[in-house]
Image (cartoon, rainbow, N blue to C red):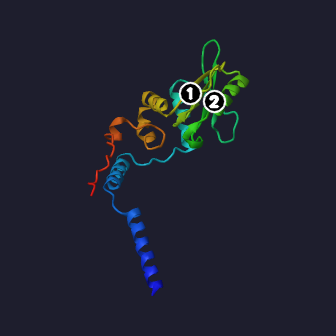
Amino acid sequence: MIAVVVFGLLVGALLVVLLARYGTNPAVVAARQAERSRFRRNPVRPPITPTRMRALAVELLTAMGLRIETEPGEPDGNRLLAVRDDPFQPTHYVVFVEAAPPGDVVDPARILELAETVKSERAAAGILMTPYEIEADPLPGLDVGLQLIDGMRLRELVAEHLPLRLREIDRYRGFPLPAAEQGPPVPPVEPTPHPVA
């Protein structure tokens, strides 16, 4: 008899915990609906593949008047040597193409590696291109010229030099979408006050 009462109390307590955990709180329901509508306006986009990013970088550099001369360095092809032809002396640039940095952020170590490569190749400057963010704040005093091109700047350059590629790159994560495609901002969900009994 006692076992039946204890079992009934345990089942009742379990039901109370489940209702508290999975019950419908109006604030939670509103937040979930807002998240779903935001997702429909701006779905998760896939990352650009390293091969596609490298091809985009080569095409962009060529459209900007640079010539890809050789491909030194790593076997995955994320380093390029670009040359701007000049009547007196050609100008060489070392280009790093970062399609998949860890955590979608290029860290300062990679920027320092680019600076060292520019020195060792005796190039005029270095260019780092990525569709993501570049963390370059703690790098004062680099003695070589570097152009750090993050997703926003890369999209601007593509719009200027390769406007037909804009729709293609907008499919990929990292490149910022134009404001018209992002939709209106989702207002914050205010919790509904419950009357105190």
Left/right of residue 23 with respect to residue 116 in the rendered view = left
Q: Is residue 1 visible?
A: yes
Number of numbered discs overlaid on the protein picture: 2
Q: Quadrant of residue 167?
A: top left
User: Looking at this view, is 165 or 100 the one in front?
Assistant: 100
Quadrant (top left/top right/bottom left/bottom right) for the N terminus: bottom left
Q: Is residue 196 above or below residue 73?
A: below
Left/right of residue 71 with respect to residue 157 in the rendered view = right
Give residue 96's position: percent from left, percent from top.
62, 32
Q: Quadrant of residue 24?
A: bottom left
User: Which residue is at 67% across, 28% downward?
Assistant: 112
In space, the residues marked 1 and 2 are separated at their CA atoms by 9 Å
Q: Tell me the kind of residue under disc 2.
A: Ile
Instruction: Report which residue position mark 2 lands on.
Output: 111
User: Looking at this view, is 121 or 100 the one in front?
Assistant: 100
- Residue 126 — which label? none
Pick out the residue farthest to the top. Answer: 88
Instruction: Report which residue position mark 1 lands on.
Output: 148
Secondary structure at numbered mark 2: helix
Is mark 1 in CB contact (under 8 Å) with mark 2? Answer: yes
Disc 2 residue crowd, few under 14, some 14–19, many 20+, Cα 10 Å: many
Give residue 39's position: percent from left, percent from top.
38, 49
